[in-house]
Amino acid sequence: MEYRKKPVVIEAFKWTPDEWVGEDPEWLVELEERDLVSPMYSPAKDEVVLRIATLEGIMVANPGDYVIIGVEGEVYPCKPRIFEATYERVEEEDEYRED
């Protein structure tokens, strides 16, 4: 059998350590305040990564990965190739536009 992913709208952003201050969505800042996400230095990779506490355990978003908040509030990282193959950007409609 084959299945198609139901069309749902999620929130996500492409994470880079440089954007950690002042550029992150409000939901991510709230998760950081609750210690569910935090940037940390990875000596093995010699770069800053984002540690994310998920239901499956700790996951890591590398610079350039997308961070997604799912339909039930779950947060997880996603590699750019998979994200771009799975999701497309939702354009906000101008509420004052006449059709």
Image (spheres, helix red, strand yellow):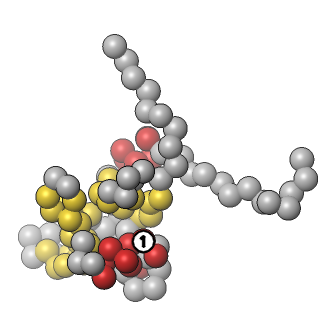
- Which image quadrant is residue 35 in? bottom left
Element carrying mark 1? helix
Residue 43 vs residue 16: left or right? Answer: left
Rendering coords of residue 31 (x, y %) = 32, 74
Regarding residue 23, the answer to whether it shows in the image is: yes
Give the residue at x 43% y 41%: 86
Rendering coords of residue 13 (x, y %) = 44, 64
Give the residue at x 26% y 72%: 37
Extreme-bottom residue of the structure: 21
Q: Which residue is mark 1?
A: 27
Extreme-left residue of the structure: 44
How many labels sit on residues? 1
Regarding residue 38, the answer to whether it shows in the image is: no
Rendering coords of residue 24 (x, y %) = 44, 76
Rendering coords of residue 36 (x, y %) = 24, 72
Observer-nearest of 95 and 65? 95
Q: Is residue 54 above or below residue 47?
A: above
Q: Residues within 10 Å of mark 1 (few under 14, many from 20)?
A: few
Residue type at tag 1: Trp
Observer-nearest of 52 and 42? 52
Extreme-right residue of the structure: 98
Give the residue at x 37% y 18%: 2
- Which image quadrant is residue 62 in? bottom left
Extreme-front residue of the structure: 72
Give the residue at x 47% y 34%: 6
Quadrant for the N terminus, please. top left
Q: Is residue 18 above or below residue 3?
A: below
Observer-nearest of 45 and 90? 90
